[in-house]
């Protein structure tokens, strides 16, 4: 058997992040002030975010942004991550396709999220911030932020979506072990939380609500900033270490992907692996299909609309140009908690609008079937989120088999599922279902949105 793993050295950890906006022919539309509808200036964002991060957020000119030495040092805890040729999965599928995956599950918190929590904590600390607030869906981002906050000496409060708080108690314990305060959202500790609980007493929460609560607390706490694990441009930027490493590793393997796949919540792991490859497509016209895999129960890229919307449920954030289902869309309680978000980041939304990438939506049962096959073939239990990418990769491999032609597939394994075994238990017991979103539901939600935004 040829080499299965492609391993880089510590010196190969990227020294700069890749800012795709500098290379995009059509730049993303600017974020807007919801009251004046004027484009936001850096000063408008300073109350909420660290300055270093705001500069990255609005940077449209520098394709490369240096990674601070303190951040690279902490990346060395687990980076570079392996690229793996999935021979086992290829064999199980009896496909002529070559399947590779970038294994981001090897991080200390089990997902890609640490790639951005570290620089976010770093820039906050550097500017004298003492407290940070954030939200977390499945708990992945909260764990990553808790570790980074502890490392840089920041106090962290995390609003965790209630459904995950109850379904995934061990992620809460991990955050608490790293020293963070964890609050189930919606909570009675903020106006946003109280309003929703009053209107819907049994509401199990969403990322949108948790963001509203975290933003509200940040605005009320002195010397406190808010940090976010996805959606925003600076988060996408930090995640590009994934694709930059994968680019070198695919060279070591002597191949170039025909199709590149990642699961999609707000877009950070997708952007992380995709942007460095998309630069070949934008700058050199290289052929590569780039596919985002989203849950059928939260299909913003495949069935949402491109327009300005709030990033949170209560309308505290700036208006962002995005493919969205409407900020008050309440997704079903699927186990891929990290994918239950109503919109897509504005860079990705523009790339999708310009036809530089595509999206597929996948039902919950197909993702678990794919996850079990992958676990048995490759020995890694994937996160329910990552299983969307695996399912999409399997569809591609099956298509290659139908056509009787080889195809090189690269997907991002954004995290492992070892803390999601309750979800696997339910799947194996036959207790999981698919969730249909009707066109009428999507249309109703978007019509509601148009009334609010105008
Ligand atoms: C958070 C998370 C996601 C979804 O977030 P993106 O910003 O879309 O990447 C996907 N996979 C895992 C393992 C996660 O923790």
Image: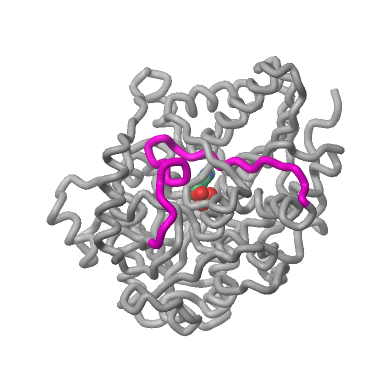
Residue located 27% across and 38% down the image: 440
Residue 328 pos. (x, y %): 28, 53
- Which segment is the magenta one? 285-308
As rendered, which of 106 and 451 lies closer to the eye? 451
Quadrant position of the C terminus in the picture: bottom left
Q: Does the magenta stretch include residue 339?
A: no
Residue 181 in view in this figure: no
As rendered, which of 36 and 207 lies closer to the eye? 36
Looking at the image, residue 447 sits to the left or right of residue 15; the answer is left
Residue located 62% across and 39% down the image: 261
- In the rendered picture of this protein, how many numbered marks are placed on residues? 0
Residue 132, image quadrant = bottom left
In the figure, 121 relative to 449: above or below? below
Residue 324 pos. (x, y %): 40, 52
In the figure, 203 relative to 40: above or below? above
Residue located 19% across and 56% down the image: 196
Looking at the image, residue 193 sits to the left or right of residue 305; the answer is left
Residue 5 pos. (x, y %): 78, 36
Residue 359 pos. (x, y %): 54, 40
Quadrant position of the N terminus in the picture: top right
Residue 321, image quadrant = bottom left
How is the protein colored in the picture?
Answer: one colour
In the figure, 136 relative to 164: above or below? below
As rendered, which of 336 and 380 lies closer to the eye? 336
Looking at the image, residue 437 sits to the left or right of residue 39; the answer is left
Residue located 42% across and 46% down the image: 300
Q: Is residue 302 magenta?
A: yes
Residue 415, image quadrant = top right
Residue 96 in view in this figure: yes
């Amino acid at each position: 058997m040829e080499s299965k793993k492609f391993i880089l050295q510590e010196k190969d950890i990227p020294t700069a992040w890749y800012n795709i906006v500098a290379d995009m022919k059509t730049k993303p539309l600017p974020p807007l002030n919801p009251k004046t509808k004027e484009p936001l200036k850096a000063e408008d964002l300073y109350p909420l975010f660290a300055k270093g991060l705001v500069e990255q957020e609005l940077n449209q000119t520098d394709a490369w942004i240096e990674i601070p030495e303190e951040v690279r040092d902490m990346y060395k805890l687990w980076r570079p991550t392996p690229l793996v040729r999935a021979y086992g999965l290829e064999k199980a599928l009896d496909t002529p396709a070559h399947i590779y995956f970038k294994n981001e599950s090897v991080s200390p918190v089990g997902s890609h999220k640490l790639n951005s929590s570290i620089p976010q904590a770093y820039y906050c600390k550097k500017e004298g911030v003492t407290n940070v607030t954030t939200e977390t869906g499945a708990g992945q981002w909260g764990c990553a932020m808790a570790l980074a906050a502890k490392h840089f000496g920041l106090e962290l409060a995390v609003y965790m979506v209630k459904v995950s708080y109850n379904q995934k108690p061990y992620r809460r314990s991990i955050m608490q072990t790293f020293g963070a305060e964890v609050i189930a959202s919606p909570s009675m500790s903020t106006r946003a939380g109280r309003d929703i609980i009053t209107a819907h007493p049994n509401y199990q929460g969403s990322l949108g609500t948790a963001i509203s609560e975290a933003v509200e607390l940040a605005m009320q706490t002195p010397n406190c900033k808010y940090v976010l694990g996805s959606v925003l441009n600076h988060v996408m930027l930090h995640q590009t270490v994934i694709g930059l490493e994968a680019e070198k590793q695919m060279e070591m393997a002597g191949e170039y992907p025909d199709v590149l796949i990642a699961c999609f919540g707000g877009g950070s792991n997708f952007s992380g692996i995709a942007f460095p490859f998309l630069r070949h497509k934008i700058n050199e016209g290289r052929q590569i299909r780039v596919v985002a895999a989203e849950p059928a129960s939260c299909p913003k890229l495949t069935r949402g609309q491109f327009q300005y919307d709030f990033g949170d449920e209560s309308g505290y954030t700036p208006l962002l140009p995005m493919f969205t289902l409407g900020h008050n869309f309440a997704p079903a309680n699927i186990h891929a908690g990290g994918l239950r978000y109503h919109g897509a980041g504005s860079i990705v939304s523009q790339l999708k609008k310009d036809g530089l990438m595509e999206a597929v939506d996948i039902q919950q049962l197909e993702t678990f079937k794919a996850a079990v096959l992958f676990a048995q073939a490759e020995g890694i239990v994937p996160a329910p989120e990552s299983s969307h990418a695996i399912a999409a990769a399997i569809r591609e491999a099956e298509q290659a088999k139908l056509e009787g032609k080889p195809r090189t597939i690269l997907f991002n394994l954004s995290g492992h599922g070892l803390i999601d075994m309750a979800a696997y238990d339910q799947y194996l017991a036959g207790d999981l279902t698919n969730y249909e979103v009707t066109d009428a539901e999507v249309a109703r939600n978007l019509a509601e949105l148009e009334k609010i935004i105008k």
